[in-house]
Image: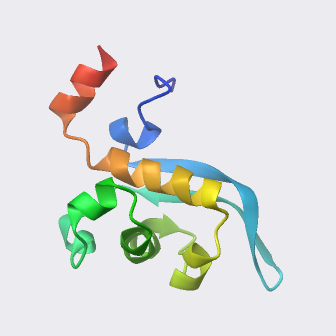
């Protein structure tokens, strides 16, 4: 699926795969990409949506473990390369876009 460059792939789908520039190493396991799924409202509990929309690191540390496959730990998120955190965070924010806004941005 081709997306305009400024619209995250997650804005039009419920699961998106994000390749990592710097893989996560957990013992013998190497995580080179992370699947993110659209969060349910309950998974956003305890997070200020405006903080999440602004890619606040603390908000991303709370939300990413709730929506990632394989499940990332808070420690995994804290040790991500900043460019990978931005990519993952941008996709999470894309999930928050209402369909009307997405249609406007796609036009």
Q: Give the camera-side residue of 54 and 27.
A: 54
> Residue 84: x percent and y percent?
62, 57
Residue 39 seen from this side: no
Image quarter (top left, top right, bottom left or bottom right) of the C terminus = top left
Residue drawn at the location 63% of the way across and 54% of the way down = 83
Residue drawn at the location 23% of the way across and 59% of the way down = 50
Residue 94 image-quadrant placement: top left
Display colour scheme: rainbow
Q: Residue furthest left?
A: 100
Residue 72 image-quadrant placement: bottom right
Is 20 on the left or on the right of 77, as rendered?
Answer: right
Q: Residue furthest top?
A: 107
Q: Residue furthest right?
A: 28
Residue 86 higher or lower than 105, as above or below:
below
Q: Give the camera-side residue of 90 and 68.
A: 90
Residue drawn at the location 58% of the way across and 70% of the way down = 70
Residue 22 seen from this side: yes
Residue 49 higher or lower than 65, as above or below:
above
Number of numbered discs present? 0
> Residue 90: x percent and y percent?
44, 48
Is 30 on the left or on the right of 74, as rendered?
Answer: right
Residue 107 higher or lower than 58, as above or below:
above
Residue 77 image-quadrant placement: bottom right
> Residue 48: x percent and y percent?
22, 68
> Residue 59: x percent and y percent?
36, 71
């Amino acid at each position: 699926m081709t997306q305009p460059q400024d619209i995250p792939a997650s804005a039009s789908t419920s699961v998106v795969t994000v390749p990592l520039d710097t893989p996560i190493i957990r013992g013998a396991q190497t995580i080179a990409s992370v699947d993110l799924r659209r969060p349910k409202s309950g998974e956003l509990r305890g997070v200020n949506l405006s903080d999440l929309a602004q890619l606040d690191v603390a908000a991303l540390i709370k939300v990413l473990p709730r929506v990632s496959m394989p499940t990332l730990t808070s420690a995994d998120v804290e040790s991500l390369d900043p460019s990978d955190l931005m990519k993952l965070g941008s996709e999470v924010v894309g999930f928050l876009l209402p369909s009307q806004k997405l249609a406007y941005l796609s036009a």
